[in-house]
């Protein structure tokens, strides 16, 4: 069972995750991407989907045409940020 | 330029679109899907993405694991439901 990070652990991890922020209203890591068009946005989503399946952890994400918003939080840790979210955020960052 | 349907035209089209409803708060067609897991949900999203590109019209959609929520509205029609939304909803319905 994944456990919630302390706010110190979370903030420490965020210093190494450029582009990601903590969304306190959703208790989640948050990042917004903007692409040239839908094809590019969905192509990137597909790459994220493969990473998500590989690490067995999935994003909450909203896409509208070229815009993609991602929230990462762990249901099994009480809807809080866990090490799984840091791992998936790191994998997503590595795709860019 | 696509034009907004009248409420009569929209409601008439909805009678032929089983599973879809009108979300007045977003002035959009709305449908929620639930799948067995992320793989199945994302597979369905991929099929929708191909249809969206074919008809040059794209959804606003939110995915969390096995859940998918879709809103269809037309920015170029003043964020209202147009014939393009009916077309995309019909194509999505045909995938099931």
Image (cartoon, coloured by chain):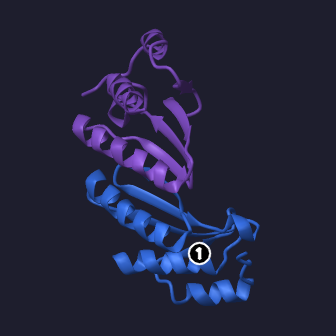
Chain colours: A purple, B blue
Q: For the view shown, which residue lies furthest in the front direction?
A: A36
The residue that appears at 43% across and 58% down in the rendered structure is B68
Q: Is residue B16 left or right of residue A83?
A: right
The residue that appears at 48% across and 60% down in the rendered structure is B69
Quarter-of-image position of residue B51? bottom left
Q: Is residue B86 above or below residue B56?
A: below
Tell me how many marks there are.
Answer: 1
Quarter of the figure that contains the N terminus of chain B: bottom right
Relative to the observer, which residue lies in front, B68 or A7?
B68
Q: Is residue A22 left or right of residue B91?
A: right
Quarter-of-image position of residue B30? bottom right
The residue that appears at 52% across and 55% down in the rendered structure is A38
Q: Secondary structure at mark 1?
A: helix
Q: State whether residue A62 appears in this view.
A: yes
Quarter-of-image position of residue B93? bottom left
Q: Is residue A90 left or right of residue A15?
A: left
Residue A18 location, x and y as percent? 50, 20
Q: Chain of mark 1?
A: B
Q: Check disc 1: other Cα within 10 Å, few if <14, some if 14-19, many if 20+.
A: many
Residue B72 location, x and y as percent? 58, 68
Residue position for label 1: B85
Q: Is residue B89 above or below residue A32?
A: below
Relative to the observer, which residue lies in front, B18 or A33?
A33
Residue A52 location, x and y as percent? 30, 40
Quarter of the figure that contains the C terminus of chain B: bottom left
Relative to the observer, which residue lies in front, B31 or B4?
B4
Q: State whether residue B37 appears in this view.
A: no
The residue that appears at 53% across and 25% down in the rendered structure is A19
Q: Is residue B85 left or right of residue B94?
A: right
């Amino acid at each position: 069972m994944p456990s919630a990070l302390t706010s110190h652990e979370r903030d420490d991890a965020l210093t190494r995750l450029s582009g990601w922020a903590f969304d306190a209203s959703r208790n989640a890591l948050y990042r917004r991407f903007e692409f040239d068009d839908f094809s590019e946005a969905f192509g990137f989503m597909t790459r994220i989907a493969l990473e998500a399946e590989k690490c067995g952890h999935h994003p909450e994400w909203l896409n509208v045409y070229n815009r993609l918003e991602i929230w990462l939080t762990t249901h099994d840790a009480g809807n809080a940020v866990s090490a799984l979210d840091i791992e998936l955020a790191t994998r997503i960052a590595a795709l860019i």
